[in-house]
Amino acid sequence: MTTAKSNIDSLVVALDVPTAQEAISLARRLQGRVGMFKIGLELFCAQGPAFIREIQAFAPVFLDLKLHDIPTTVHRALEALLPLDPALIDIHTQGGPAMIEAAAEAVRAHRQRGGRTQLLGVTVLTSLDREALTRLGLATDPGDMALHLARLAKECGCDGVVCSAQEAASVRDACGEAFHRLTPGIRPRGGAVQDQARVVSPSQALRNGSTWLVVGRPITRAEDPAAAADAILAEMAEA
Ligand code: C5P
């Protein structure tokens, strides 16, 4: 099968596994079929920063640590992480405008030194529904809140947001094509939904305007992860 390079570039595989050995084995099997590997808290906490470089030997890395603290702390944490030069790194937009601006400032300085990292803001976690937001004292619709936070992220210097693929089109309309949408909760046709609540198919996510599709278990837990990635790329090609 020949696959468009742009679809491969848009596919981000979440390496949600506990050991370095499992992560490297997956990275080796998926190399060339995937635009980026996502390393989240589980693997980062277990393996530490130096491990990022081992995965970068296979593909660029999205360092998904969702930083959320006072502006100075986030700025300093980013200064410590950015020498790893991940392709993407993220913060929680709910840390507020000053925190987002401090993060954007650290990323800008890194790029001025020749780095290539882009900064994403997490809008509303897909695990939070309206009831959970109400219990947090935020009586609002998760979709409306995500759009509001996407506008704030853009205003404060982010390069894009993490959002549901169901919100990607409205974020693109509000913030413009160049402001990226990275969307988890992607499920191929006939795939198990697992604990994701609002899932979108690979082709629909692209039609909705997702820049990057994050796929974890449908690939990483498949008997043949490379074949599962190929099947998802084929679905993306239908968009
Ligand atoms: O296995 P699955 O495809 O559900 O993995 C999706 C990945 O995206 C996981 O690493 C999960 O933590 C992450 N994620 C998510 N929803 C968000 C943000 C990140 O599912 N809102």
Image: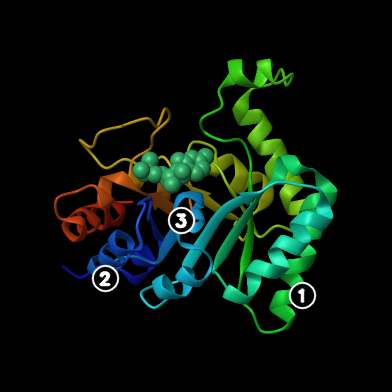
Q: Position of residue 104 (x, y in %)?
A: 75, 62
Mark toward the start of the polypeptide (1 vs 2): 2
Residue 129: x and y in percent read 55, 22
Amino acid at the residue labelled 2? Arg
| Closest to the observer, 209 or 14 | 14
* Mark 2 closeness class: few <14, some 14–19, many ≥20 residues within 10 Å: some
Label 3 residue SS: helix
The answer as to whether callout 3 falls within 8 Å of ligand 1 is no
Q: Which is more foreground, mark 1 or mark 3?
A: 3
| Residue marked by disc 2 | 28
Q: Residue at x 70, y 57 (%)?
A: 158
Question: Please, is residue 91 above or below residue 119 in the view?
Answer: above
Looking at the rendered structure, the kind of residue marked 3 is Ala
- The quadrant holding residue 47 is bottom left
Q: How many marks?
A: 3
Label 1 crowd (10 A; few <14 / some 14-19 / many >=20):
few
Residue 175 appears at what percent x and percent y?
A: 68, 50
For residue 109, which numbered disc appears in the image?
A: 1
At 31% from the left and 32% from the top, the residue drawn is 193
Q: In this orientation, which residue lies closer to the viewer: 27 or 116?
A: 27
Provide the residue designation for mark 3. 46
Looking at the rendered structure, the secondary structure element under dot 2 is helix
The location of residue 9, given as percent across then percent down, is: 40, 67
Whichever of labels 3 and 2 marks the residue nearer the N terminus, that label is 2
